[in-house]
Image (spheres, coloured by chain):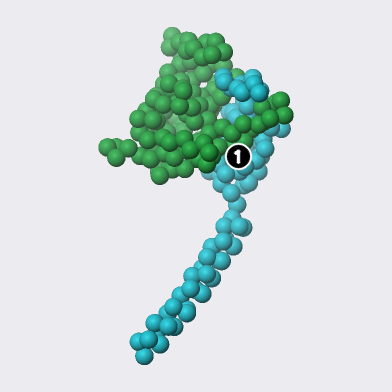
């Protein structure tokens, strides 16, 4: 009986585990990336030298002034879901590779 | 442990480079939080924010407090201030420099930040690891 139960546990748990992983993977695939993840992964060079406001997996406002960009973004997406990033132009950073 | 990543950015000559980027919250004078993504700069003595971001968090220009700080491209007028910063679940006071020109990158520098975290750059893995100092 004990052997049978052990056998059933070994048999059942791996399947349940796999299923749990599958559901987790499914959930991760459909989950919207955080603003940070979006910024890391997205080519933002179209906004060279500008501030961008990110919310809900996209750039929702951009411009030269962080304050103005943020205010426009708040109107579009609300206060709690926005992040700001500054996209560099070629001259902005102090040390740049030449080759 | 907080894990930040590198962002691949174009250099303008057809090439690109990976730069370390953080996810940081700054507390405004109205007690709300502004999330932004500065570069992590172990060569910067202090965290620096551009002019318009400083205005957004409610900093006020006091001409008597303006000082010049130096960089490779010359000097930048700044005002030193303190700000409440949130990185991961850690909330703390950090000294910052508020640039009075816009054309500077937002930088997460060493003062108060690197004192609080052990920072490990794992460039090959495109990750930066921040672990809270055990004494804090």
Observer able to see residue A15: yes
Judging by colour alone, the chain drawn in green in this rendered image is B
Where residue B21 appears, as percent x and y from the top left, is 53, 35
Picture residue at 57% right of the left edge, 57% below the top: A28
Residue in the foreground of this view, choosing between B103 and A74: B103
Identity of the residue drawn at 49% across and 31% down? B40
Say which residue label 1 marks.
A39
Q: Which chain is cyan?
A: A
Query: Is the N terminus of chain A in the top left, top right, bottom left or bottom right quadrant?
Result: bottom left
Helix, strand or loop at label 1? It is: helix
Return the residue nearer the eye: A18 or B112. A18
Please name whichever residue, A90 or A5, is drawn nearer the observer in this view of the structure: A5
Residue lying furthest bottom: A1
Q: Is residue B58 left or right of residue A88?
A: left
Residue A60, given in percent of the width and then of the height, sits at 66, 39
The quadrant of the image that shows the C terminus of chain A is top right
Which residue sits at x=62%, y=36%? B8
Q: Position of residue B97 (x, y in %)?
A: 46, 20
Task: Establish if A76 lies above or below B53.
Answer: below
Q: Report whether B94 appears left or right of B59.
A: left
Quarter of the image where one finds residue B1? top left
Would residue B25 appear left or right of A73 to someone viewing this image? left
């Amino acid at each position: 009986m004990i052997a049978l139960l052990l056998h059933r546990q070994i048999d059942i748990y791996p399947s349940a585990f796999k299923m749990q992983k599958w559901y987790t993977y499914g959930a991760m695939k459909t989950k919207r990336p955080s603003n940070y993840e979006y910024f890391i992964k997205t080519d933002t060079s179209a906004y060279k030298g500008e501030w961008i406001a990110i919310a809900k997996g996209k750039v929702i406002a951009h411009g030269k002034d962080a304050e103005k960009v943020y205010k426009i973004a708040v109107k579009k997406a609300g206060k709690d879901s926005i992040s700001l990033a500054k996209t560099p132009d070629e001259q902005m950073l102090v040390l740049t590779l030449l080759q | 442990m907080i894990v930040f990543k590198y962002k691949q950015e174009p250099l303008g000559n057809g090439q690109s480079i990976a730069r370390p980027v953080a996810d940081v919250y700054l507390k405004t004078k109205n007690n709300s939080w502004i999330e932004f993504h500065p570069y992590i700069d172990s060569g910067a003595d202090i965290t620096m924010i551009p002019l318009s971001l400083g205005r957004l968090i409610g900093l006020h220009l006091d001409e008597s407090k303006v000082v010049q700080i130096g960089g490779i491209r010359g000097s930048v007028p700044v005002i030193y201030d303190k700000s409440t910063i949130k990185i991961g679940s850690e909330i703390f006071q950090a000294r910052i420099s508020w640039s009075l020109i816009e054309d500077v990158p937002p930088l997460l520098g060493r003062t108060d930040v690197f004192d609080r975290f052990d920072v490990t750059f794992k460039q090959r893995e495109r990750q930066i690891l921040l672990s809270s100092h055990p004494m804090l």
